[in-house]
Image (spheres, grey):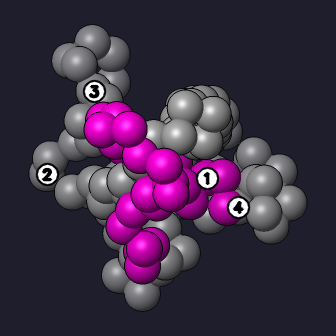
Amino acid sequence: MRYRRGWRGRGRPPKPVSLGEIPAPTSFIPTEVKNALPIQVFASELEAMRLVDKLGLEQKDAGKKMGVSRGTIWRLLQSGRKKVITALSESRPLTIVVEENILADDQC
């Protein structure tokens, strides 16, 4: 099994993440792009933001739904929110990357 790109070899490797749905849009491009490099948001970060920020679940409940710990949800939220805010504030394109170790709900 392959692991998420964020793992650098120290500590435990991350567990596979379960998503409610694989995101359909793969990019957000602002109207005034100044040859800026796109920011890559992982599908797991997007799913954590959807569950906690959009649906209003608590982090521990979102962790149960995704099959990871509350601490992992916290990390996904922090990195995902930072990337989205950077893309919006700097008018940079946003690309959604689906990791290799993703399980859709129907595959669980």
Identify the amino acid type marked 3.
Trp
Residue 4 locus on image (x, y percent): 27, 41
Q: Secondary structure beneath disc 2? A: loop
**Sequence-wise first label, 2 or 1:** 2
Quadrant placement of the C terminus: bottom left
Which callout, 3 or 1, points at the residue further toward the start of the chain?
A: 3
Residue holding disc 3: 7
| Mark 1, other Cα within 10 Å: few <14 / some 14–19 / many ≥20 | many
Task: Kindly identify the amino acid type of the residue bearing the numbered disc 2.
Answer: Met
Q: For the residue labelled by badge 3, is the local secondary structure a helix, a strand or a loop?
A: loop
For residue 94, side relative to residue 68 (left or right): left
Dot placed on the residue nearer the N-terminal end, 4 or 3:
3
User: From mark 4 to mark 3, how far is it between C-alphas?
Assistant: 23 Å
Residue 50 x %, y %: 67, 61
Seen as rendered, the residue at the extreme top is: 10
Closer-to-camera residue (24/1): 24
For this rendering, which residue is in front, 15 or 52? 52
Dot 1 falls on a residue whose secondary structure is helix
Give the left or right position of residue 100, taking residue 33 as reference. left
User: Considering depth in this image, is 94 or 18 the residue closer to the camera?
Assistant: 94
Q: Residue at x 55, y 32 (%)?
A: 90
Q: Are marks 4 and 1 in contact (CB under 8 Å)?
A: yes
Residue in view at x 53 percent, y 40 percent: 91
Residue 62, horizontal then vertical, whole percent = 69, 56
Q: Position of residue 99 (x, y in %)?
A: 28, 54
Give the magenta range. Answer: 22-50
Residue topped by disc 4: 51
Q: At 42% from the left edge and 87% from the top edge, which residue is drawn?
A: 106
**Residue linked to disc 2:** 1
What residue is shown with label 1?
Answer: 48
Left or right: residue 105 versus residue 7 is right
